[in-house]
Image (tube, grey):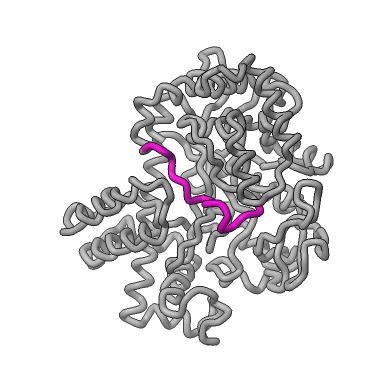
Amino acid sequence: ARWAKQQGASMALVNPLASSTPILPQQPSPYFPSSRRFRNPLYLRVEELDGAREVAGIRALAAEARRLNRQRRIDRDIAFRLKLQAFERIWRRVRRRRDRSFETFEREQGTPLFEYAAFCALAERFGSGWHGWPAAYRRHDAPAVQRLARDRDVSDRIRFHIWLQYQLDRQIARASREAPIVQDLPVGFDADGADAWAFQDVLADDMSIGAPPDQFNTRGQNWGLPPFVPNRLREAGYDPFIQTIRACLRHAGGLRIDHVMGLFRLFWIPRGMEPRDGAYVGNAADDLLAIVALESHRARAVIVGEDLGTVEEHARANLMARAVLSYRLLWFEKVPPAQFPEQSLAAVTTHDLPTIAGLWTGSDLKAQKQIGLAPNEQGTLEIRERVRTLTRASDRTPLETVIARVYDALGRAPSRILTATLDDAMAVEERPNMPATSGEWPNWSLALPHPIETLKANALAARIARALTRPASSKRRM
């Protein structure tokens, strides 16, 4: 965030920081969280934790962790084990200290935070999948769960997880003061996770959401995420949704809503059936959008709706009327960036699509074929031809020049917010996530080829930043 601000950025857009269940193996995808209301301790900077400098062995653990940076592929399980050791050592040092700020945070966050921390402690004891826990602990409001607060050993573990959320809150707040952070709201959460445990009364636990078959994916998609039942959510006063939006907007300058059409309708698939057997179920969009509007107004935050793919015109009109920014990609738009709508966030690509380097060199198309996918080769070549026309590049043009010229073009968009990716700034060829794959591609597990600290000396990154920060512009840049 500090580097982005120094380059003229007014915001920093991040992937979901949502929590995963604190056991092994760790879930790599930030879009399959245990909870959307709480944050993942893996993102904590251990050295900046309160009390870290007082604990012996922290530097040794940090050195061991830094050795992982030599590997391109991220091993979250090793990182989790190392960080958990550090967290526990620091907690043992500070847990008996009086910290009024921590106490205030714990009190203000109240029951939802206690129950989330209790879930974490129970998951450590009984494993993932709360449906298989002892019956006494399968409900968040069960008497046995509430009694955990009086169990010395378990209550200490619960406070440990509360303390981790407090430290995350402090570090996110500090980062957002450098450049306001735009958080990312996943479309759902893990059926075995903390949110599903807490909100089970308003979920259709025999359903999962996904996408119907289409020309790009003839089998459709099943995301394995349980949907809210619209009438049950309304009867609950929309409290689960309000908690989620409010949590995501805490210390945030904005919120990107993934698959924003999900506020209008979701594709439900019955358990044990194929996507072709599913159907769309409508949501109370006006109510949900009103909640988003109110919470964003309170947080003084911008809202971005990821409206890629098929979006019904009435939905887009509704979003525009509520000042939700559309999401416009250079890869998808048939018009040049200069003709993008002002009420939009403009980007070149997303984590699910080719990077500029991957597209231009052909390596992304090649990778798809190598892992057995059936890529839309014609569509990819058409995008590459548009890039060639837009940048006036030839096959002999240096790759970094092509990347810079693409962002020169994006910089001409009238969009309210312009964004660039770190992958493009480092000319990365591999995309972060390859949809419709699991073990075939290292989804969400490829680190940048160089440490983030090297951005200060990265000429391409500086060149991209200049393209998006022209003095004549009043638009926001990320």
Q: Residue at x 47, y 76 (%)?
A: 127
Relative to 229, does residue 247 appear above or below in the rendering? above
Question: How far across and how far down the image is residue 94, in percent?
Answer: 23, 62
Please state the total of marks drawn on the protein image: 0
* Closer to the camera in the image, 113 or 226: 226
Relative to 375, does residue 271 appear above or below in the rendering? below
Q: Tell whether position 156 is magenta.
A: no
Most distant residue in the bottom direction? 135
Question: How far across and how far down the image is residue 210, in percent?
Answer: 72, 58
Q: Is residue 196 at all visible to an observer of this figure?
A: yes
* Closer to the camera in the image, 75 or 314: 75
- The overriding secondary structure of the stretch rendered in magenta is loop
Q: Is residue 303 at all visible to an observer of this figure?
A: no
Q: Residue at x 44, y 34 (%)?
A: 179
The image quadrant where one finds the N terminus is top left
Relative to 178, does residue 43 appear above or below in the rendering? below
Question: How far across and how far down the image is residue 68, in percent?
Answer: 33, 51
Q: Residue at x 39, y 41 (%)?
A: 175
Please state the extent of the stretch shown in magenta in the rendering: 436-450
Question: How far across and how far down the image is residue 269, in percent?
Answer: 76, 65
